[in-house]
Amino acid sequence: MENITDSCKKCGKQNAAGAKFCSNCGSEISGKKKLFEKNKKGNLLFVIAFFTASLIVKLCFFNSPAIDKELLRMSNEMNKLCPIMVDRDTRLDNTTAKPNGVFQYNYTLVNDDKDNVDTLALKNIAEPNIANSLKSSPDMQYQRDHNVTLNYSYRDKNGNHLFMISIPADRYK
C-alpha cells in the first residue's frame, strides 16, 4: 500500500499517513478532510453504480412493463372469444393480465358445485397436467421466453371459488 503523506499547512512539514497533527508544530493536518471528501465521492459513485446495476438486472432478468403490456394485449384478444367451452365440463370465462408478468385463466366447472367436488383431488390431478402441457405447447412459447407466471382459477357452476393453480416459469420451462 502506498504511504500517503500530508504537508502541514502551517509549517510545511511532511507528516506520516494517518497523522492527525503535525509532528513539527502540532497543528491539525487538513489533508484528512480531503481524504474524507474523496471517499464521499467514491461512495456516491458506488451508490449510483449499485442502483444502475440493480435496474439493469431487473430489466434483464425480471418482467418489465413491456411484458405486462403484451400480456394485457393477449388477454384482450383472448377475451373477444370468451366465454368458450374447453370441454363438456369446463368453460373458459375470461383471462386477466396482472402486474409483474402474471397471466390468469378464469374457468368455470359448469356441471359441478362446490359441495360435490373434491377440490384437492381435482387440483392434484390438474396441476401436473397443466404444467406438462405448458412445456410442450407451441402456443405458450412467448410465456416460456418471458418467464410468465400462469394462474388457473376455477369456480363452480354457482360462481363459488374452488381452487387456484399458480405455475411459475421455472416449473414449465
Image: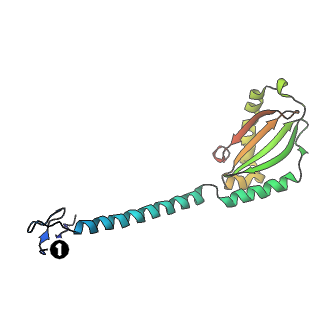
50 lies above or below 96: below
Q: Is residue 140 left or right of residue 93?
A: left
Look at the picture and state if 154 lies above or below 104.
above
* Percent x, y of residue 105: 79, 45
Residue 111: x %, y % from top left = 90, 31
131 horizontally vs 26: left or right: right
Give the residue type at disc 1. Lys
Along the viewing direction, whichever of 84 and 23 lies nearer the viewer? 23
Q: Give whichever of 124, 163 is nearer the camera.
A: 163
Residue with the most extreme bottom position: 12
Q: Residues within 10 Å of mark 1 (few under 14, many from 20)?
A: some
* Residue at position x 74%, y 59% in the image: 70
Which quadrant: the N terminus? bottom left
Q: Position of residue 77 (x, y in %)?
A: 84, 56
**Residue drawn 88% across the image and 32% down it:** 158
Secondary structure under the numbered disc 1 in the rendered image:
loop
Q: Which residue is mark 1?
A: 9
Instruction: Please tell me which residue is depicted at 84% across the width and 47% down the height of the picture.
Output: 94
| Horizontal side of residue 93 vs 131, given as left or right | right
**What residue is rendered at 35% in x and 64% in y?**
40
Vertical position of residue 11 compared to residue 92: above or below: below
